[in-house]
Image (spheres, grey):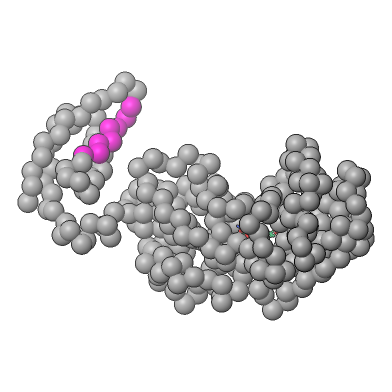
Amino acid sequence: MLTCRIYLNWEPNKKYASVKAYIELGWVIHACFSSEVRACVLKVKPLERNERSEKLAKLYIVGAGPGSADYVTPAARKAVQEAQMVIGDQCVLDLFREDIKSQTLILTCKNIDDTLKCASDSVKSGKTVTVISTGDPGFSGLLGSVLRRSLDKNIEVHVISGISSLLACAAKLCLPWDDAVLITFHKGASVERKREFAEAVKAGKTVLLLPDPSAFTPSEISDYLIKAGVDENTRVAVCQNLTQADEKIVETTLKGALKQSFVPTSVMAIKGNLKNN
Ligand SMILES: C[S@@+](CC[C@H](N)C(=O)[O-])C[C@H]1O[C@@H](n2cnc3c(N)ncnc32)[C@H](O)[C@@H]1O
């Protein structure tokens, strides 16, 4: 047992003080005290060296891949199995049905603020929480959503990458993506972003993109590019429901994509000047 004395500095207008005492490298103690307390003694039992990393609560943000269980990595499954709380939309939770051993929260567009706040509070209370994102969390995924919500800086965030739908699209089309431009319109299509996109296509780059399912669909994208001066015979592919039983790949031209409709779960590829095109 180790004893340490800590003194509390009260800031004006604060109802409580939060004290973080680093007793030794690898130990963190969080304690909250009422305003009457000026000093206290903490008695703590050291963790065994191999227990330390497990005892620190963490927030994992893991990628679930594009939708098929075959594309879920063992690392993602492990993070779900070991979590004390698992958060994700119903489709991704279904992919991990056998792995979930704890409380689950179903994430929806409407409850995202409350649910991520709950995730953060649960980590602060000592739980290890795993948030599951489709594809890879870092591309139009939940990593950005979590970081934008001013996460408590004491929370340790770990990201476990997943197979992005963009990468599944490149693989399906046998398309090297060394020099590809990756674009998301998933959260809206600003004039500036559209302009940069058209410039990349005109420069002959291969572009892999997530359309905006409600405001900038593959046919609207084709219309925009043709009006921006791109050759209407430029080859494009729209990959729908990748890796899933109802996967459908449409390979056509900008002109050919104009009058077609595609499911919202689509990736569009505009093929640049590759030798085999
Ligand atoms: C919120 S974003 C998430 C993207 C994800 N983080 C990723 O890396 O693929 C959702 C969009 O990803 C694309 N998407 C996700 N899964 C897909 C799939 N199986 N097939 C085609 N597109 C998919 C669609 O454009 C969909 O509207």
Q: Is residue 89 above or below residue 220?
A: below
Q: Is residue 182 above or below residue 85?
A: above
The stretch in magenta equals 14-21
Which quadrant would residue 74 be assigned to in this image? bottom left
Which quadrant would residue 243 be assigned to in this image? bottom right
Residue 180: x, y in percent? 68, 54
Q: Is 176 in front, or is 115? A: 176
Q: Is residue 259 above or below residue 24?
A: below
Residue 126 placement, left or right of 78: left
Which residue shows up at 11% across the image and 36% down it? 5
Q: Residue furthest front?
A: 275
Asked if residue 185 is among those painted magenta in the image, a careful observer would answer no
Residue 214: x, y in percent? 78, 52
Asked if residue 19 is among those painted magenta in the image, a careful observer would answer yes
Q: Residue furthest top?
A: 12
Which residue shows up at 61% across the image and 70% down it? 67
Q: Is 57 in front, or is 112? A: 57
Q: Is residue 215 visible?
A: no
Image quadrant where one finds the C terminus = bottom right
The number of numbered badges drawn on the structure is 0
Which residue shows up at 39% across the image and 64% down it? 83
> Would you say the magenta stretch is mainly helix, strand or loop?
strand
Residue 176: x, y in percent? 67, 63
Quadrant for ligand 1 reads: bottom right
Q: Is 113 in front, or is 26? A: 26
